[in-house]
Image (spheres, grey):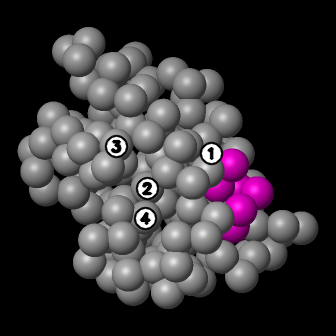
Amino acid sequence: MHFALLWSLFEAKALDTRASASAILSLVHEWQAQGRLDASKFSDHLEHFKIRYFANGQPTHHFNGLHLRNGDNPALVRAVLSGANVDPADSVAALFIVVYRLRNNLFHGMKWADELRDQLANFNHANSALMSALDICGNV
């Protein structure tokens, strides 16, 4: 319930109700250019997803469950989650693309083919990241 509310608020305030990976990437790079991005606020959440989706430089069995599409900038997400790209703005953007995929998979996609097992930590991290992003949006 919290995730649905927070995502809807983030999408409305930050993405003008038009969420996409490219919109997320543009938003985060805009925050960086304006000096409003503090990537350290997102590092714990990013680390959670790095551990979940990559081990020893290779994708885990969970990675394919994201169902990344071409428009989701899978090369960027893979590079960040594997540790090959450590650019702060790219890292935060990749985090939110993962959150966007969680949202799409929950509401429109595969309907959690692996059920909701092991999803609580994902939603807790996604919710905290969304609240930090909303703080940035509120500081305009």
Q: Which mark is residue 99?
A: 2
Q: Observer-nearest residue: 43 or 119?
A: 119
**Residue 69 percent coordinates (x, y):** 39, 81
Label 3 vs label 4, nearer the camera? 3
Label 1 element class: helix
**Is residue 90 visible from the viewing direction of this image?**
no
Quarter of the figure with residue 86: top right
Q: Earlier in the sequence, mark 1 or mark 2?
A: 1
Distance CA(mark 1)–CA(mark 3)? 19 Å
Labels 2 and 4 touching (C-beta < 8 A): yes
Q: Disc 4 versus disc 1: distance between alpha carbons?
A: 14 Å
- Sort mark 4 into few (<14), some (14-19) or many (20+) by Cα contacts within 10 Å: many
Q: Residue at x 52, y 79 (%)?
A: 115
Mark 3–mark 4 Cα distance, whole angstroms, equals 13 Å
Circle nearer the N terminus (1, 3)? 3
Mark 4 lies on residue: 102
Spatial separation of the CA atoms under disc 1 and disc 2:
10 Å
Give the magenta part as a residue range.
48-53
Q: Nearer the viewer, mark 4 or mark 1?
A: 4
Q: Nearer the viewer, residue 91 or 107?
A: 107
Q: Main secondary structure of the magenta part?
A: helix
To which residue does mark 3 refer? 2
Location of mark 1 (residue): 46
- Quadrant that contains the C terminus: top left
Q: CA distance from mark 2 to mark 4?
A: 5 Å
Q: Which numbered disc, 1 or 3, marks the residue closer to the eye?
A: 3
Residue 128 within the segment the image draws in magenta: no
- Image spot of residue 24 (x, y percent): 32, 50
